Structure formats: structure tokens, C-alpha cells
Image (cartoon, rainbow, N blue to C red):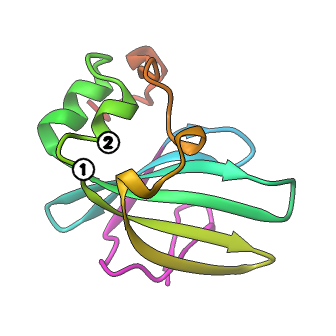
């Protein structure tokens, strides 16, 4: 397991997380950048059943160019994490303090869990030094 900078545990994933940056936070990290060597993964909060029950997060590999465009507000989060052709991703289910991760295709994720088509990032919301 890897430790987030503010103490959140990142589950054992099939890649080693070298660094974590939270991009959107609301009562917990909703969107994070995870660096694994040269590969960028975005951890997106996809679903929550209720306050302390089931949470589903997606860990999506993204290309550096597309990620830069997203941070500048040029492409949507949906376009970046659900490219054509579909990517593999890792779905993490958290329940009562335990976490299970499985490999999936972006096409396996229910539509209602995915970011909307107009989910553009507002660059002015970024902390200094990210772009």
C-alpha cells in the first residue's frame, strides 16, 4: 500500500505509485493524478452508495498530451479516460475499510458512473505549479 500526502491509503495496485497530486477535493479526493514511473494514471471517484458504504473509483492510464490538454480545459475528462479505442483501467471498490481492485475495460463501466461529456477542467482552479 502507498500513503497519500494527507494520509489517505492508496490500495495495492498492479503499478507502484511514485507520487500523488489531488486535483479536485470535496470531503475527500475526487480526482487525483498518480504517477507510476513515466505513466500518468487518473484516479476518479465514480460512485458512492452512501456516506460510509460502497465507493467505486477508477484508475485510468492517460497519455501525457491528453492530460495536458485536460488541465488547460481543452478536452473533457470523459474524452481522456474513455478514449477510442477503449483502454484498460483498474476499478477499485472500497467497502467498510477494505479495498478490492480489478482490471476492466472502460467499456465495462456503467454509463451513469462515467464523467459527463461536458466535464471540462477549469485551469484557474489548479494549485500553483501544476501546469
* Mark number, residue 64: none
Image coordinates of residue 60 in percent, x first then y, are 35, 55
Along the line of sight, which residue is nearer the eye, 76 or 8? 76
Is 14 placed above or below 76 here? below
Q: Could you say where residue 4 lies in the image, as x and y percent from the top left?
A: 53, 66
Please check the rendered image and state whether residue 115 is part of the magenta-colored stretch, yes or no.
no
Q: Which residue: 51% across, 40% down?
A: 114
Give the Cα separation between the discs numbered 1 and 2.
6 Å
Query: Which residue is at 50% across, 77% downward?
Result: 101
Q: Secondary structure at mark 1?
A: loop
Q: Residues within 10 Å of mark 1 (few under 14, many from 20)?
A: few
Please give the name of the residue rendered at 33% of the width and 43% of the height, measured from the top-left corner. 81
Which residue reaches farthest right?
Answer: 51
- Local crowd at mark 2 within 10 Å, few (<14), some, or many (≥20)? many
Report helix, strand or loop for mark 2. loop
| Prevailing secondary structure class for the magenta stretch in the rendered image | loop
Q: How many numbered badges does the structure rendering display?
A: 2
> Which residue in the protein does label 1 denote?
86
**Residues under numbered marks 1 and 2 in contact, where contact means CB atoms less than 8 Å apart:** yes
Q: Which residue was labeled with disc 2? A: 82
Q: Residue at x 81, y 77 (%)?
A: 96
- Quarter of image, res 9: bottom right
Is residue 97 toward the left or the right of residue 67 in the image? right
User: What segment carries the magenta color?
Assistant: 1-22
Coordinates of residue 89 in the picture (x, y in percent): 35, 62
Q: Position of residue 110 (x, y in %)?
A: 54, 48
Give left or right: position of 122 versus 80.
right
Camera-nearest residue between 131 and 104: 104
Residue 6 highlighted magenta (yes or no): yes
Amino acid at each position: 500500500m502507498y500513503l497519500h500526502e494527507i494520509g489517505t491509503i492508496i490500495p495495492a495496485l498492479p503499478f507502484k505509485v511514485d507520487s500523488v497530486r489531488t486535483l479536485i477535493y470535496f470531503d475527500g479526493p475526487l480526482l487525483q493524478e498518480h504517477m507510476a514511473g513515466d505513466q500518468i494514471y487518473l484516479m476518479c471517484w465514480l460512485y458512492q452508495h452512501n456516506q460510509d458504504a460502497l465507493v467505486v473509483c477508477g484508475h485510468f492510464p492517460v497519455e501525457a498530451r491528453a492530460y495536458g490538454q485536460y488541465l488547460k480545459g481543452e478536452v473533457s475528462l470523459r474524452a481522456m479516460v474513455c478514449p477510442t479505442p477503449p483502454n484498460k483501467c483498474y476499478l477499485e471498490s472500497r467497502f467498510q475499510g477494505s479495498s478490492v481492485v480489478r482490471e476492466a475495460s472502460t467499456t465495462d463501466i456503467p454509463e451513469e458512473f462515467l464523467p459527463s461529456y461536458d466535464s471540462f477542467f477549469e485551469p484557474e482552479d489548479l494549485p500553483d505549479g501544476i501546469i
